[in-house]
Amino acid sequence: MAAIWQVAKDDNQAYPALDGDIETDVLVIGAGITGLTTALQVAEAGKRVVVLEALRVGGGTTGASTGNLYAPVTKGLSTLRKKWGDSVIGQVAASRTEAVDYIEETARRLGVDCAFHRRPLYRVLTDDDSALNNSLDEELDALLCAGLTASLVSETPLPFPIHRGLKLDNQAQFDPLRYVQGLARELSRLGVGLYEYSSVLDIDFDHCRAETATGKVSAESIVLATHTPKGINLLQTGMEPLREYGIAARLSGQDYPQGILWVLDPFHSIRSYQHAGQDYLIMIGEQHKTGEGEPGVDYYGRMESYLRSKFPVASVDYRWSAQQYGSADGLPYIGRRHGSERVFLATGFAGDGLTWGTVAGRLLGDLILGHDSRWSELYDATRFTPVKSMKEWVKENTAVAKHLAQDYLTPTEVKALDDVPVGEGRIVALEGDKLAVYRNELGQVSAVSAVCPHLKCLVHWNPGDRTWDCPCHGSRFEIDGSVIEGPAYHPLARRLSSE
Ligand SMILES: Cc1cc2nc3c(=O)[nH]c(=O)nc-3n(C[C@H](O)[C@H](O)[C@H](O)COP(=O)(O)OP(=O)(O)OC[C@H]3O[C@@H](n4cnc5c(N)ncnc54)[C@H](O)[C@@H]3O)c2cc1C
């Protein structure tokens, strides 16, 4: 299932897989917006840089995002304000505004045609719900407190009536995939070694060495720009992995609303996008915890029904889903990895990581180059914030404990391989082993171990995407067990295949 940005795949340059052993100054793992922004900072300063990417450039969440760029955060600056206070939301807004300006300036400087446009951001309520009404007032106050210019409105570019809205001018939108492809082209021109289909399978943090199936890279510094850190990392214990669904449609009329349009009740993010003269309406929504989709619910169907209830949809052309990771205290973790002077990471961006990833790339660049950064203390990845993090930490760890106990002890949904329905996956207990079993349309069965190699939780079947998803820390796997994303390095062990 392809994201809308694949519509512009014409300018997608390919890079080779790593083949052999290399020494470099900076190794960046992950070619999303975080990794490539970091790589650009250090390459332009004259460092030798290598980038290893498991998929294609932008093939992770960056290329599946909505392409909205804004100073506040989706959950609201008012939410951050309650935890962190007035001064911090001012710094959040300032660092994010600088990052959006940087994207605009970088796209212009490098000649990247990524459809960057300045647009207003709207948060709107369609019903008179008192709890959310208050939140709109609180958000207005927080935006003003953070130095942003915002106002309440009663109309928006949406073609349906709203109850109340909030408008923030001078935010932006772009095509995230073409932007990072542009960064990759520039890196290649600067002599950076960019390698696709080069999944890192092991990292020796003490000696700054990483290994793929076909080579090794030794470096002075390593940047983990893999969205969530690979392997076991304490930060994962408080981070919530969530899935969200996206669709892109053509409308029967010409009325494509412009702006970042967030309908809050329930949350749907809507925007328009034009490529090669064709308009599309993009919508993201139906968020749920990874591995915890409601049984029997067709999330793509729900998205389509909602869109059709609000717009004259002619056709739905793209459907996809993607993952985000929220931090325990609401701010991203950007900086040195715990206990390592030479290893850096950036994670915990929630649904706001195009801008956070850019803040991170610039901040990590400064740290690696030994420059001062105004934001390094605030976003420090080793910070200890027990009071601000406690609620999320308890929630996440209770959920992990529940999955570890309940999923192992509860009898499986089906007793035998033969009971797995066609086109579906089920967990089956066989000779003391828990198997993740899939039956294809021809009736053939394939089975992999259901035990996630990251921290041993049992994976769950995701019927919408036909994947095995781990509800504990968000690792996701193909039917054949290979890693799609998340902290796991290694695939689900293969057990049997009747294909
Ligand atoms: C549906 C959705 C919509 C969103 N929309 C927006 C938005 O409009 N605005 C916004 O600001 N944020 C948005 N976000 C969040 C934002 O997209 C992400 O936070 C951001 O793209 C993260 O960038 P990244 O570079 O850190 O991670 P990614 O883009 O995921 O890049 C990480 C890369 O690391 C690679 N990798 C992983 N493991 C390995 C390995 N072992 N070896 C080598 N490479 C590896 C991956 O393949 C991937 O390409 C959205 C998120 C979702 C889920």
Image (spheres, rainbow, N blue to C red):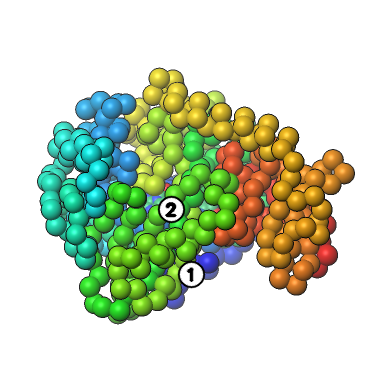
Q: Could you say whether the residue bearing mark 1 is in a helix, strand or loop? A: loop
Q: Position of residue 89 (x, y in %)?
A: 25, 33
Residue 44 visible? The answer is no
State yes or no: Cβ of the residue under disc 1 lies below 8 Å from any atom of ligand 1.
Answer: no
Drawn side of residue 282 relative to residue 489, left or right: left
Disc 2 from disc 1: Cα separation: 33 Å
Residue 333 visible? The answer is yes
For marks 2 and 1, give the one nearer the viewer: 2
Residue in the image at 39% along x and 47% along y: 351
The image quadrant that residue 452 belongs to is top right
Residue that extends furthest to the top in the rendered view of this protein = 387
Q: Determine which residue is flagged by label 2.
A: 286
Q: Position of residue 354 (x, y in %)?
A: 37, 50
Residue closest to the eye, 379 or 363? 379
Quadrant holding the C terminus: bottom right
Question: What type is the residue that disc 1 sits on?
Answer: Gln
Residue closest to the eye, 84 or 129? 129
The numbered disc on residue 13 is 1
Q: Where is residue 468 in the image (x, y as percent from the top left)?
A: 64, 52
Q: Position of residue 331 (x, y in %)?
A: 37, 34
